[in-house]
Image (spheres, rainbow, N blue to C red):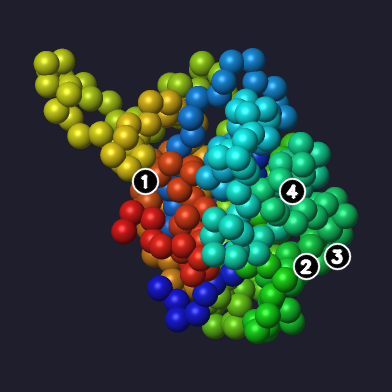
Amino acid sequence: MADKPSRALVMYGDGLARSVDQSNTHIHSLASVGTCGFLSLPHAPPAETENERIVREFAHLLDASEAYTLASGLKTKGSENEISTLSERFMGLKAALVTDSSSLTSFGKQIGLDVLQLSGMCQKSDDSFPFDATATELLRLIGFEGGKCLDVSLYDSVFVHIGGDNVGLIESLIGGIMRMAQPGSEIAPRLHLSLVLSYGSVTDKDVSLFPVKTPQDGINPAFQGLVPRQSYTMRGEKTRDDVRDYCPMLVAQWQDAVTRKDLVDTLSFEALKKLSGSLVIPADRFIHEVAFKLWKAPKYGA
């Protein structure tokens, strides 16, 4: 635990988990120095559109599924069903969303996020380090400027949503941020950096390609009820009945001298399944883990 509250930068590669390959050295470098794991999601509702999926999965990352059902009209608003902002839920948390998605822009505003346009922020600087100016601006939003940690910041946390065929943009931004937050700098011990990659829309073929559920072969069916449930399939004392046991989000988190280091050296499904330290947690617990680092929430699971 740090002796001061951290400031969080969450890079969310929406649907980009399949696009990462060996050439994405900055992404793998982040995974190799941080702690990695899976974030499980529920199944998609039938006939869900791509825009609906984008908003729904982002809502799960922020534990805002209830807000999503209200905002999308799936649940009727009333005196007991009002959309709570992130600030109301997490001790005055100041947060921003950077995205080019119009549907996500609308939802972000409804849950109290300041929304900034990604395309307006993406400026190539030079051929050696493209998008370093963008990385600098993202760090400035959370109070890191000129290699210094300022006493006051515009935001406690910034979520950057990047979709489409833009794994190269995430690669460049991660590289720029890691160069500016070298261990020993003022930034490194206060920056909590997360990289989340999702699979986007999934198909039946993905069930066998990216399974997170541990096979229980050889167990007598009569004793199946005695096998302990994995914690990600529970919410408190209640069973989560709609857990998708495949295609989880991949997550790597790093904060110098704060986060643990596991044995993962590449950000891939196979590496995380064999070597990650965090294993699987529900996606809606992610924001609680981040908010804890910002001193805005109690420790998840404590």
For the residue labelled by badge 2, is the local secondary structure a helix, a strand or a loop?
A: helix
Find disc 2 in the rendering and name its residue. Answer: 137
Q: Amino acid at mark 4?
A: Lys
Q: CA distance from mark 3 to mark 1?
A: 38 Å
For the residue labelled by badge 1, is the local secondary structure a helix, a strand or a loop?
A: loop
Q: CA distance from mark 4 to mark 1?
A: 32 Å
Mark toward the start of the polypeptide (4 vs 3) = 4
Crowding around mark 4 (Cα neighbors within 10 Å: few <14, some 14 to 19, many 20+) is some
Q: Relative to the observer, which residue lies in front, 198 or 88?
A: 88
Residue 205 rendering spot, x and y as whole percentages: 51, 17
Find disc 3 in the rendering and name its residue. Answer: 125
Mark toward the start of the polypeptide (4 vs 1) = 4
Give the label, 3 or 2, closer to the camera.
2
Q: CA distance from mark 1 to mark 2?
A: 32 Å
Image quadrant occupied by the N terminus: bottom left
Mark toward the start of the polypeptide (3 vs 1) = 3
For the residue labelled by badge 4, is the local secondary structure a helix, a strand or a loop?
A: helix
Q: Are marks 4 and 1 in contact (CB under 8 Å)?
A: no
Q: Are marks 4 and 3 in contact (CB under 8 Å)?
A: no
The numbered dot on residue 279 is 1
The numbered dot on residue 109 is 4
Residue 13 falls in which quadrant of the image? Answer: top right
